[in-house]
Image (cartoon, grey):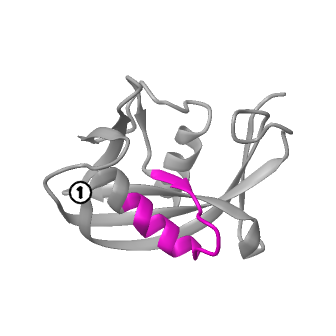
Amino acid sequence: MKLKVKFYNDINDKDLKFAVIMARYDGRWIFCKHKERETYEIPGGHREPDENIVDTAKRELQEETGAINFEIEPITVYSVTRRNCVNSNGNETFGMLFYAEVHSFKNTLEYEIEQIEFFNKIPANLTYPEIQPYLYNKVIEIKGEK
């Protein structure tokens, strides 16, 4: 099954399973490098049971980048349709795409992320190259290059 990424204006909150955050620091995009991979990814992750999706985004941004002072806002709902390790039946899964401006970080990363790096544009070596460019481009479309 070919992967599909779509965007929606609204969806039932209970259907939102992920939060992904396109974040900037000092005018550059923040990407994470997982300890077990050699590629870069946009900060984000799974929503915990009974967690507000905005709280998911804040938690994931803090855990994956070490951000401690930031402004965050929802951009749009997105979906991914494809059979994979988190979606064994190939159904459409939904997440919320956020934008954040990070002002400061703590000194250490405590979770699965080995390091963060700052880029002027989306890097070529992405963990999810079939998904991440769509999310990046949607944020650029809505927020502009700055």
| Residue marked by disc 1 | 25
Residue at x 48%, y 53% (from the top left corner): 44
Q: Nearer the viewer, residue 20 or 50?
A: 50
Where's residue 113, x and y in %?
34, 41
Question: Quadrant where the C terminus lies?
Answer: bottom left
Where's residue 134, x and y in %?
59, 44
Residue at x 69%, y 34% (from the top left corner): 85
Q: Is residue 16 above or below residue 3?
A: below
**Residue 143 in sight from this viewpoint:** no
User: Which three-letter amino acid code belongs to the residue tagged 1?
Assistant: Tyr
Magenta-span inclusion, residue 52: yes
In this rendering, position of residue 54 left or right of residue 111: right
**Residue 75 in sight from this viewpoint:** yes
Question: What is the tally of numbered marks visible in this picture?
Answer: 1
Q: Is residue 36 above or below residue 98?
A: above
Where's residue 94, x and y in %?
71, 57
- Going by the picture, which residue comes out furthest to the left? 107
Q: Is residue 69 above or below residue 33?
A: below
Is the residue marked by circle 1 packed among few (<14), some (14-19), or many (20+) residues within 10 Å?
A: some
**In terms of image quadrants, where is residue 144?**
bottom left
Q: Which residues are magenta?
A: 44-61
In this rendering, position of residue 139 left or right of residue 48: left
Q: Is residue 138 above or below residue 131?
A: below
Q: Nearer the viewer, residue 60 or 112?
A: 112
**Local SS, label 1:** strand
Residue at x 40%, y 72% (from the top left corner): 72
Residue at x 49%, y 74% (from the top left corner): 55
Question: Quadrant where the N terminus lies?
Answer: top right
